[in-house]
Image (cartoon, grey):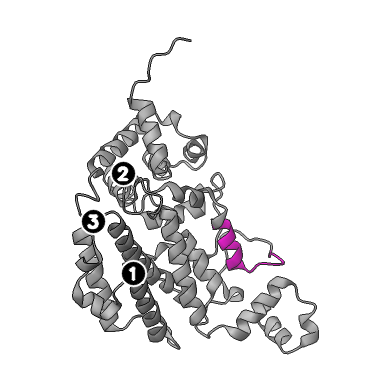
Amino acid sequence: MVKYEILNCILCKERWNFMNIRQQQEAFEMKWLSRFAAKSVDSEGRDREDSPCDMRTVYQRDRDRILHSKAFRRLKHKTQVFLAPEGDHYRTRLTHTLEVSQIARTIAKSLRLNEDLTEAIALGHDLGHTPFGHIGEEVLRKVCQEISFCHSEQSVRIVEILEKEGRGLNLTREVRDGIRNHQMSGSPKTLEGQIVRLSDKIAYINHDIDDAIRGGILTETDIPVECKKILGNSVQDRLDTLIHDVIKQSEGRPEIGMSKEVQEAMMDLRAFMFQNVYLNPKAKGEEEKVKRMLKELYYYYFEHVNEISEEYKKLMEERKESKERVVCDYIAGMTDRYSVMKFKEIFLPNSWKIV
């Protein structure tokens, strides 16, 4: 009913003047966005009913809720690829997230898809990452066998439960679907979610090359010649090629894709990065230490669960969550430096002081 009222208002300038800001934006979406776009008025809604905002659409509210969350702020101190780099210019999980958002919004806007929904998914897609990136994820997957830890599912758990002291952020189903399905194995229901899924790969392949060159692990001349012929001779050129290709191949279609040639070149470049950077001993020199540290922290808190934060203890008391699940949540939520600090506090002796 709301959808038809908005369409009616578009045709009547007098009624436009009586619409609030949110309704005007919804009307703009109905008139301007592609027929393949997810419209705010067509959202499947939230698990808990919310009173509509007079200024923001449902997806704009989701974006703002993610942006103001504690989990989002913690991303600035979580590893992207390089463990605790000393330089100021290496990516963190937060800057990765912002780069994904920028690429995804550019594609969404060019295709006249819902930029607000795209941005909300992009900002939330990595909220569930552990300290020290995929290393922490690997550790928790092994020690928490009851739950088969996965960062994309943890991201959804954060926005559904862990934020706001167990109440979650109460996001729309479309945003949660995009967050859950942002990995290569995922299958997002919306085109906006599909954009984020591709933008994530485009962002990390290219900015990880940039960081690897800065760290002395790669030079531009190491990049495979065949990849450079198709994608370009610099990080900027490759980003430009990939983004333009996605837009060109997806325009006017009910799915987001790439040309076969460009996609194959991107996947070859990704394989090159795994071989030469992601599994490179120079980049992963401290990895075993991190694994041992996170394992020890998990086992310690499993035996001393009374020492975890109150908000996590409430999950056991009020939601009857298992101890394994809650300790896993607690470790996963730590930043790199906080986990190191807690490890030192628990396992290393302090200097003797005269009081």
Question: What x and y, as percent, mark residue 216?
Answer: 25, 55
Q: Mark 2 or 1, which is nearer the eye?
A: 1
Q: Residue furthest top?
A: 354
Quadrant hosting residue 46: bottom right
Provide the secondary structure element on which disc 2 rests.
loop
How far is mark 2 from mark 3, CA to CA? 33 Å
Q: Main SS type for the magenta part?
A: helix
Viewer-nearest of discs 2 and 3: 3
Q: Which mark is residue 217?
A: 3
Q: Quadrant of the N terminus?
A: bottom right
Residue range highlighted in magenta: 52-66
Q: Which residue is mark 2?
A: 144
Q: Earlier in the sequence, mark 3 or mark 1?
A: 3
Q: Could you say where residue 108 lies in the image, as x and y percent from the top left?
A: 49, 76
User: In the drawing, does residue 230 fall left or right of residue 189?
Assistant: left
Work out how far the residue at label 2 is from the one at label 1, CA to CA, in angstroms: 38 Å
The answer to if 54 sits in the magenta stretch is yes
* Label at residue 51: none
Q: CA distance from mark 3 to mark 1?
A: 16 Å
Amino acid at dot 1: Val
Q: Earlier in the sequence, mark 2 or mark 1?
A: 2
The crowding category of the residue bearing disc 1, from other C-alpha atoms within 10 Å (few below 14, some 14 to 19, many at least 20), is some
Q: Is residue 232 visible?
A: yes
Q: On the image, which quarter does residue 33 sit in?
A: bottom right
Residue at (32, 67) in percent of width and height: 184
Considering depth in this image, is 313 or 253 the residue closer to the camera?
253
Disc 3 on helix, strand or loop? loop
Please indicate whether residue 278 sits to the left or right of residue 79 in the image.
Answer: left
Q: Which residue is mark 1?
A: 235
Is residue 256 in sight in this rendering? no
